[in-house]
Every structure is written in structure tokens, then in C-alpha cells.
Amino acid sequence: MAVILPQPASMIDTGELLDWYAEAQRDLPWRQPGVSAWQILVSEFMLQQTPVARVEPIWRDWIARWPTPSATAAASAADVLRAWGKLGYPRRAKRLHECATVIAADHGDVVPDDVDTLLSLPGIGAYTARAVACFAYRQRVPVVDTNVRRVVARAVHGRYDAAAASVRDLDDVASLLPDDERAPTFSVALMELGAIVCTARSPKCGVCPLSHCAWRSLGFPAGTGPARKVQKFAGTDRQVRGKLLDVLRGSDIPVTRAQLDVAWLTDTAQRDRCLDSLLVDGLVEQTEDGRFALAGEAGNQAPAGEAGQADSAQSDSAAAEANRRR
Ligand code: SF4
């Protein structure tokens, strides 16, 4: 006789999840009433692969300074990169600036509310489009990030690890959403559960609000996926790119190659590769005389007296710079 498996929709109790969320949710500024769709979109850009604690102060400064898409679009690319600070993955800052520019120019300074239009904007992918539609416009759309995939894998499918991300995840999560106005809150609550209770390394099953969890019911079977690698930062290209950008953020005028060279002496080939990648990404540009600046600042002039310094440092690394200009 065929075994009828329960449908996923029956396996996460909406009431349990929402009651828990009402009590346990973190007090995050982008969840407060009155926060605009643009400001939520900014938070979603910043939160990609970056912990809340690092994002929060930068987000507060950012929206105080540039509360709308047009205000962001009017800022220079270099100012945007400076304000991004040490959030990492600075291409996000560039894409956010581009996104602001398109929204200001083509959408009346209003963040679009439908997923397809959101997906057409620079820097916005499947997750961010649905997160904005759901959190800013309270639409019933599945919002699937790593936390959500992990909770669903455990509570619904009885697996410790989520399978590789796939387009099926959207249908999987959509099937869990309540079919009423609670859906957006269900989405953020599911994400919150994964962030603070059903965590990757040590799920706190003893305080979990869900009375049914397939993984717990099966007796906590071991994961079958590869062991999670601890992401290292020290010595990576990300660290080196960050150090080079730190030098450029700290100067209002273009800097010499020598000033960048001393930022990373551990591995000069790696440093050169990272500088190349920053140029290719359009985060850094080079002046006519071979110095380097944040995007949009290559035209800034050195004050009298500093130009000579730049020239002499430039001659130290003239060969390398000639290569870079090609
Ligand atoms: S019982 Fe444990 S594994 Fe299941 S959803 Fe809750 S925290 Fe995650």
C-alpha cells in the first residue's frame, strides 16, 4: 500500500511560528514601522554574507545620509564606496549605487513592488527581489535564503543539511506559506528562526517553538553533506582587496602605486592580482599619470607639493603601472 507522506504545508505550524516571532524577534532597525522600501532594499544588499552586527551601524549612517534612491544616485561612486566602509564585498556598493540610479531615473524614485521588475534592477537577484516584495510590500512570495533552506530541510524534510540550492526551493517554501495576510510575517519569522534558533552548527531544539520537526522526530540523524569549512579571511584576496581599498578610502586624491604596494607586502603577486581585479570591477580607476583612485575620483587633483611626491613614487613602479594601463 502506498505511503502517503504529509504535505509540507502541514509541517510548520503558522500559529506556533508567529507567536514565537512576536516574542523573540530581534529589534532590527530595518524592521521598524516607517522604514521605506528603499531603506529595506539597502539593508538586504548589506546583509548579503555579512552579519547583522556589522551592517547595523553602516545602514543607519547610510540611510540618514542618503534616505532615497535619488539621494544615493546623486552621491559619487567614491563616496558610496567610502560609506560602505569595511562591510566587505564592495562590488555590492557599486551595484547598489547603480540600482539607485536606475530607480531614480526610470521608476520615479520609487522601488518597484513586483518581483519581475525588481529582478531587472542592477544587483538584485532572486532572493533580494522577493525579500523586498515581501518585507517592504507585504506580498505573499517565497523568500529563500540559507537560513530558510536549513529550517525547511530539518523541520519539513528531516535532513540536517539543506540540499544544494535549486529553483525547486521556491516552490518548496511557497507551499509552506499561509494563504492569507500572515504570509509575509511567516517568511520573516522562518528566516529569524534559522538565524537565532535553528542555526547551522548548533540548533537549539530545546527552545524551538515548532512542535513538529521531522529531523527531531527521526532522532537527529547525522548530516550527509560535506563537513562545513570554516571560512577564513586572513590572507585571502578579500582581505588584500580590502586593504587596498582602505588606502584609497583614506585619501581624497589619487594615490601612488608605492602607497598601495606597502598595504600588502606578504605576497606581491597576490597584491597585484587584487589591484587588477579592483580595476576590472570598476571600483578603482587609474589616472593619466598612473596613480590610483576610487571610482570617479581619478580627476581629483593633488594639492601643490604632493604632485612631485606622486611623480617620484610613480617612477619607482613605472614598469608595473605601464603594464596595468594596457
Ligand atoms: S527542532 Fe531543532 S532542528 Fe527542528 S526546526 Fe527546531 S531548532 Fe531546527
Image (tube, rainbow, N blue to C red):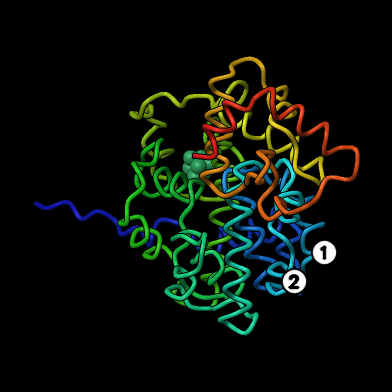
Residue that label 2 marks: 71
Residue at position x 58%, y 66% in the image: 99
- Report x, y in % for residue 243: 69, 31
Return the x and y of residue 148 as percentages of the image width and height: 48, 51
The residue at 78%/52% (across/down) is 300
Tell whether 104 sits left or right of 119: right
Q: Does the residue labelled 1 lie within 8 Å of ligand 1?
A: no
Q: The residue under label 2 is which amino acid type?
A: Ala
Query: Circle 1 sits in a helix, a strand or a loop, which is it?
Result: helix
Q: How crowded is mark 1: few (under 14 residues within 10 Å), some or many (20 or more)?
A: few
The number of discs equals 2
Q: Is mark 2 on a helix, strand or loop?
A: helix
Q: Is 210 above or below relative to 316?
A: below
User: Which one is in front, 7 or 146?
Assistant: 146
**Horizontal side, residue 217 vs residue 235: left or right:** left
State the image quarter where residue 43 is shown.
bottom right
Marks 2 and 1: CB-CB under 8 Å?
Answer: yes
Disc marking residue 65: 1
Seen at 56% across and 29% down, the residue is 237
Question: Residue 157 location in percent, x, y?
Answer: 34, 46
Residue 42's place in the image compared with 148, above or below, is below
